[in-house]
Image (cartoon, helix red, strand yellow):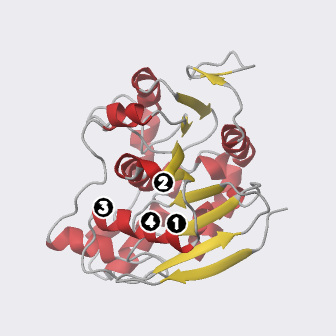
Amino acid sequence: MGWMWRERRVPGETEIFVAWQECPQDRVLLVIHGGPDWDHSYLRDPLSELDCRLLLPDLRGCGRSGTAPEYHPDGVMGDLVRVLDAFDVERADVLGHSYGGMVAQRFAITHPERVRSLIVSGSSVLPVPPDAFEGWAERDEVLAGQEDPWQRGDLSLEQCVRADAFEAAGASIRRAARMPGYLKRLEQVRFRAEWVRQLQVSGLVSPRLPDAARRIAELDIPVLLLHGRQDMTFPVGLVEPTLELIPRASAVVLDDAGHMLHVDEPEGYLRAVREFLNGAAFQRGLELGSPRPV
């Protein structure tokens, strides 16, 4: 059973809301959500089962955090430092999912003294090439069946963000049995539109830094690439070349999981994170004890 969730607001120019979970263990996992106009809540389960302190902030302008003068990734880096400082955390293990995976990488590169290890979940270190999904007929069919809420004229920006998340559910979840639970999660997300509003007005700077793989390799920290083989957002094909570039990286690929791999295969996801944090042995993209390659 997980520990009780608590809530805290970290003051500053932009107030940051943090859901956190105490634990007798000193180890801290900082979890960075995707979107970015989502909140942290869709990542709580199954991470709440981990035996470590959990910090799940809502990024600036997201969920219950305050609005910001601008939405540049450098501002987010400062927010994350303030969160760690507020909880008296010198170094944390950092997990980022989807867009949050790129934010987590940037944080590790720009603030290496604050990051003990890095988990890139349902995201990528390498840029996604334009032809990454070419020839995947199933993905083409799923995407063709989605309605584009951004083409509707009767929705606010916030309603578009929310509708887009629900429309994308079919491309995000692999296992049909997991879909009802995932839709219930989406009902709980506090969707906003601060980031997309800036995108439409002046554009957004990507959190992905140039030559990220080399720079992460130079940090010499443990890195876990945690991916769903059926991910229709970030291709699994980028996992193996990333392992070649980051000597201390390992990978776990969950076969029957899509972009929301923690929903599709929560047991495998939790086991991978727990064993990584506990220092379980991995070797060059092959989980020890398993003959299945990445």
Type of amino acid at the residue the image marks with label 3: Pro
Distance from disc 2 to disc 4, alpha carbons, whole Å, reads: 10 Å
Across and down, in percent, residue 242 comes to 42, 28
Numbered tag placed on residue 114 in the rendering: 2
Kind of residue sitting beneath label 4: Leu
Residue identified by numbered label 4? 80
Q: CA distance from mark 4 to mark 1?
A: 6 Å
Between discs 3 and 4, the one toward the N terminus: 3
Amino acid identity at mark 2: Arg
Disc 4 vs disc 1: Cβ atoms closer than 8 Å? yes
Tell me which numbered mark, 1 or 2, is placed earlier along the sequence.
1
Q: Is residue 39 left or right of residue 49?
A: left
Mark 4 element type: helix
Identify the mark nearer the N-term, 2 or 3. Answer: 3
Task: Quickly name the residue at label 1.
Answer: 84
Query: Mark 1 or mark 3: which is in front?
Result: 1
The residue nearer to you, when weighing 159 against 50, is 50
Q: Is residue 272 above or below residue 49?
A: above
Question: What residue sits right under mark 3 in the picture?
Answer: 73
